[in-house]
Amino acid sequence: MAGPERLTHLDDAGAARMVDVGGKAETERRAVATGRILMSASAREAIAAQALAKGDALAVARVAGIMAAKRTSELVPLCHPLALANVQLDLEVVEEGVRAVASVGLVGRTGAEMEALTAVSVALLTVYDMAKSIDRQMTIEGIRLLEKRGGKSGDVVAG
């Protein structure tokens, strides 16, 4: 019996386990996550102008984030492999750097929160990789779930 105080990825003896979702109904699910990378003005300007030696950072980061969402179960040990219906990743150059927002949708027995968070994380890591020749002091921060829709636990929207 899972409650808010029980960690569902641990069995009664405290050993790690994959949660059994076999008996759960398939429902439409959606998750949205965000994060940002802070950087120097010169790095931000180079990204905005597509002037990095490695190419268009936002285009590459978008593809990297989408690929990461699809492979989340290979990266996070207890995640279920999911048949994602869609992944949208928006990257925007903002005053302090780059902001990422990932939206993931599917019909399934478990949610897509980890996939959305993974998409944002890998997209921002890719921006770092592509711009590190200009700024090695970039900071990735604020990666968090904005909303989750569907499933037994209901909808969650960040405040």
Image: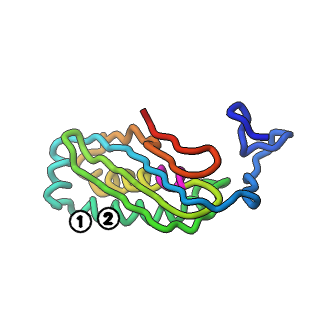
Which image quadrant for residue 51? Answer: bottom left
Horizontal and vertical percent for residue 36? 33, 43
Horizontal and vertical percent for residue 85? 49, 68
- How many neighbours does mark 1 have within 10 angstroms: few (below 14), some (14-19), or many (20 or more)? few
Residue at 42 percent across and 32 percent down: it is 159
Horizontal and vertical percent for residue 8? 72, 43
Residue for badge 2: 60
Compared across the picture, whether 140 is left or right of 43 comes to: right
Residue at 37 percent across and 42 percent down: it is 140
- How many neighbours does mark 2 have within 10 angstroms: few (below 14), some (14-19), or many (20 or more)? some
Question: Is 74 inside the magenta-drawn segment?
Answer: no
Label ID, residue 55? 1
Prevalent SS, magenta region: helix
Say which element carries label 1. Answer: loop
Q: Disc 2 marks which amino acid?
A: Val
For the residues labelled 1 and 2, say whether their Cβ atoms are less than 8 Å apart.
yes
Front one among 140 and 1: 1
Q: Disc 1 marks which amino acid?
A: Gly
Q: Where are the magenta residues, as a range? A: 112-117
Say which element carries label 2. Answer: helix
